[in-house]
Image (spheres, rainbow, N blue to C red):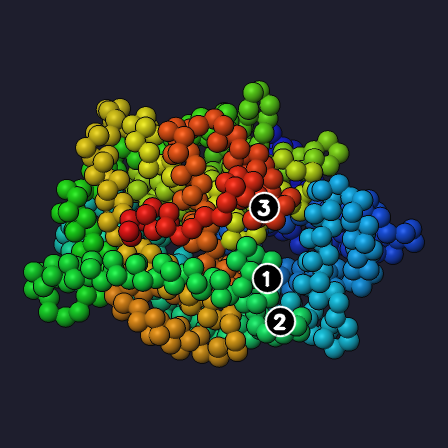
Amino acid sequence: MNPELTQWTGPEGLPRFDLINDADFAPDFEAELAAAEAAIEAIAANPEAPSFENTVAALETVEDRLNRLLSIFYNLSGVDSNPARQELQRKFAPVLADYGSRVNMDPRLYARVAAVWEQADSLAPEDRRITELTLRNLKRAGAGLTGEARDRMAQISARRAVLTTQFSQNVLTDERDYVLPIADDRLAGLPDWLVRSMRAAAKERGLDGQIVTLNRSLIVPFLEYSEDRALREVAFKAWTARGSGQGAGGEATDNLPLIAEILALRNERARLLGYPDYAAYRLEPEMAGTAERVEDLLMQVWEPATRRAAEDQEKLTAMLRDDGVNGALEPWDWRFYAEKLRAREHDFDAAVVKPYLTLDAMLGAVFDVAHRLFGLEFQPFTAPLWAPDVRAWRVTRGGKLMAIFVGDYFARPTKRSGAWCSTLQGQHKIGEGQRPIVVNVCNFTPPEEPGAPAFLSWDDARTLFHEFGHATHHILSDVTWPSISGTSVALDFVELPSQLYEHWLEQPQVLDAHARHYETGEPLPADLRDRLLAAGKADAGFGTTEYLESALVDLAFHRGAPATDAMAKQAAVLDALNAPPAIPMRHATPHFAHVFSGEGYASGYYSYMWSEVMDADAFAAFEETGDIFDPETARRLEQTILSKGGSSPADELWIAFRERMPGVDALLRGRGLI
């Protein structure tokens, strides 16, 4: 047994990652799982009459040690995967699924929680809320099923865990193994900063010259700037082939058979629980409630988005013709000509802005906004984390320690793609209480040499703000129970804090203070700043359309009978929408990790836009005061939303902040679509 997996002894209560070996996980996992099972059995078999304290409250802490171990393991599996950890993931997945099924479908626990719920009127508000949610979760897990239906539900859970784990590993393999060497005579159009990043990527892999990988911070700017149309096509097709069996891993990483089985199992699960399909099951506890309401929102935005995209496509096609190409505008052309159009219409060159957008400068902006809104202060400290470039900060307010914040910002071959926020431990007030340890993960291009500045694109800076918005939800959480702390809210409410935080990046007073040239310290010139902000909405038709395609395909996958051929279903949905061929889905089905690497965003990718309707209106609350840092509005935001976690239904939290529900117009204005 390695005590460091459950009794963390590092600085500020962090785990000592330097004392953890892969060989430690399996035996410790088995021991902690057995201990958790024994503790849950004691709750289920308790001869005393069910009470809130001996049933619902007891369940809140029964898996603490197991969860601490798993938080370390799954964090490492995402940020620094290796064959040993991938094998352990495959081993743990069905075991955890079986354990979860037995616990969540235990009729004794179900009966005890139901008995506590009968006394709900006598409970304190938070106690009543977690009792309600615990009972709902048990019902939705199948605790009310019996006989063959019960057995089948357990089998479905175990199999889904295996399939989603394999899906994630297949995508990671394709991303990790793909390399496109770019010869010196094929660098036309690429800015110096991008070529340097491509050479750094090659050096990291022990290669000479420069390469393109499937890291978004490399491949997107390559598609934006490379004048070599043939190379853009090769790179784009590799990027979109991940998980299709046509990627770097070949048939061994083909996710399409996995997807068909995942969809079938989800549908079967929903029908066992009495729902007509998985979308009805999945959306029932969310703010949207039904697939019809989701589709209504998405289609309200589809028409203005595709209208703007069609206007832009005409301009881009004319530019393609000027370059002597008579064929259609292809997906690998769009970003290249959109960048040229942006530069022409807004007199803007993104490369000129890069020297002002270093990671350290933008972190300064992120922390300054948090300080001005919520009084938070950040002090860096040294700790043995999982990679040398991972950083940690103490987060305080008025001298009180609020949280520990960890940032892992640079791409590495062993890290899965994308950006996310997670916790090593969440906030609660049981006993002496527990402060959150929050982790933000990104995949920015690392600096050429250690100690050199890391330059961000505008999209990278937006991602940095987005993920820190999630972090504030954890840092400011102030509830008693772990199950409702931080981001434990409705799926279509969870993106509100993150997307709201992005708005402050676009404010002139924030950019003027923090976007400074890495060599001279001079602020971003006002005219360049204004052109940057105007150019940021220049391709809104494309960005909104590619997102909506993914959201609508996700929704269609989970309504009605499950698709046996996912790619045929995807094509049918896009055809019915009359989707522009030059704008493919943001996440093509074979690597749509939001939907198929777990249950998190299945039938729920729409939630980014549902939350955006609210975030646009929430920022308007600050603007209406004449002060984007208005203290009273910030205090109300914290007290009604950020500190509350899932202690009340999402619509009640929103109404407490804004006193009305929002409409779609603020979203359309924010995206520049009206």
Q: Mark 1 falls on what kind of element?
A: loop
Let me know if residue 235 appears in the view: no
Q: Nearer the viewer, mark 2 or mark 3?
A: 3
Are discs 1 and 3 less than 8 Å apart at CB?
Answer: no
Q: Position of residue 72 (x, y in %)?
A: 60, 46
Where 185 falls versus 582 (above or below)? Answer: above
Task: Kindly identify which residue carries mark 1.
Answer: 284
Disc 2 from disc 1: Cα separation: 10 Å
Q: Which mark is residue 136?
A: none
Relative placement, left or right, of 15 versus 563 is right
| Amino acid of disc 1 | Glu
Instruction: Tell which circle, 2 or 3, labels the residue nearer the N-terminal end.
Output: 2
Which is more toward the observer, 162 or 364? 364
Task: Kindly identify the residue that appears in the image at 56 percent across and 56 percent down.
Answer: 286
Residue at the far top in the pictured view: 399
The answer to whether residue 95 is above or below residue 59 is below
Residue in the foreground of this view, choosing between 584 and 665: 665
621 on left or right of 670: right
Provide the residue designation for mark 3: 652
- Mark nearer the N terminus (2 vs 1): 2
Query: Quick one: which residue is furthest to the front in this view?
Result: 660
Q: Are marks 2 and 1 in contact (CB under 8 Å)?
A: yes
Q: Position of residue 453 (x, y in %)?
A: 32, 33
Contact (Cβ within 8 Å) of mark 2 with mark 3: no
Which residue does the numbered mark 2 point to in the structure image? 275
Q: Is 538 or 423 nearer to us in this picture?
A: 538
Question: Mark 2 falls on what kind of element?
Answer: loop
**Where, by quadrant of the figure, is residue 629 drawn?**
top left
Q: Residues within 10 Å of mark 1 (few under 14, many from 20)?
A: few
